[in-house]
Amino acid sequence: MTAFEDLLTWRESSTTDEAIAAAVDVGARAPVAASALLAGAQRIVVTGAGSSYYLAQSVAAVARAALRRPVIAAPLSELILRPEGVLVGAAGAAREPVVIISRSGSTSEAVSVAERMRAAGHPTVAVTCRPDSPLAATADVMLVSPAGDEDAIVMTRSFASMLALLLEVVALVGGAPDLAADLARLPDHWGDASAAARIGRRLGATDWSRVVILGGGPAFGIAAEWGLKLTETSQVPTSAYEPLEFRHGPISVCEPGMLVVGLVGGPGAIEEVAVLEEAARLGATTWLIARDGDEARGTNGELSLIGGGLHPTARLPLLLHPGHALALELALTRGRDPDSPRHLGQVVILDPG
């Protein structure tokens, strides 16, 4: 079996810091058209499929707070099958811009949504890692992560870098210089993510019966992406929840042999850490990923500190790498090949027939 360090997916995840730095630079110089579209919109839709949808959820949560206006995330499929449940612009009124995220820019649903939105009069912004893709050619405005593209099937640095790019654009449009400044500092904190990844590898050496990832606010999309990576690569039963929602039923799954990971940072951290402590009392193994020691006070499980001193939103792209380490190591522990996850290809192309 392939050694961990030789995994293509791991090698690409390990260059996420470089991809983030390049993406933040691009975001700081985003086309005026992109900023103008978002700055002038009364309502914004952010969409994607799979990992890109979870990315959209994180971006939408950050943008709502920064722009102080409705920003919603929806799967690409909803804009195709049930657009009336997503789009609200009345006939003759200004149409809300639609931000379409796709690593390859070739996913069938992404291209279809871009075509449909253009036909309906909605401005479109493509966020991708491939500037020559069909999506980029169809959208009104293109934002490209220049170092985010990958050969691996599952997304790693592409997710983190497109997230960083969009956070930078949101910071500029929303007038948040503190967020923009801290995004530029992300590569300086890569050591935090690398240290957490080592803990992820150690935890991945256990064949857990179940893994639960907790994340609130913008971190919920990151938690869902962790869950997808674990599901794709190792097929271990995995769920993602808002931390306090975990108490409302799902906490019944806590028992010895399962792992609960908490992604906390910023407002609500104390309350969210308390949920992790409760899971530990019920027998689960826990791993808390917080910003600093004050947020982690009282926890008795595994602990990683990422992004101390950074804006809580700015640190989000750093939270992906430890999840990749956990997922890939667990896949190897379970006898899976995470570079060739079953039933999956890099791009989803739907048969038009």
Image (cartoon, helix red, strand yellow):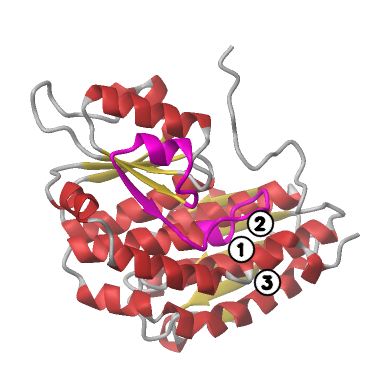
- Between the residue at mark 3 and the residue at mark 1, the CA separation in whole angstroms equals 12 Å
- Count of numbered circles in the view: 3
Numbered range of the magenta stretch: 129-158
- Is 146 in the magenta? yes
> Which callout, 3 or 1, points at the residue further toward the start of the chain?
3
The disc label shown at residue 200, or none: 3
Q: Name the front one of labels 3 and 2.
A: 3
Query: Helix or strand or loop: what does disc 3 sit on?
Result: helix
Q: Amino acid at mark 2?
A: Val
Residue position marked by numbered label 2 in the rendering: 211
Query: Residue 280: in sight, yes or no?
Result: no
In the picture, measured across the screen, residue 199 lies left or right of residue 223, that is: right
In the displayed structure, 336 sits above or below 24; it is above
Query: Helix or strand or loop: what does disc 2 sit on?
Result: strand
At which x and y percent is residue 306? 49, 79
In the picture, measured across the screen, residue 165 lies left or right of residue 124, that is: right
In the displayed structure, 252 sits above or below 181; it is above
Q: Residue at x 45, y 54 (%)?
A: 221
- The 10 Å Cα crowd at callout 2, few under 14, some 14 to 19, many 20 or more, is many
The disc label shown at residue 306, or none: none
Residue position marked by numbered label 1 in the rendering: 260
Q: Residue at x 55, y 69 (%)?
A: 16
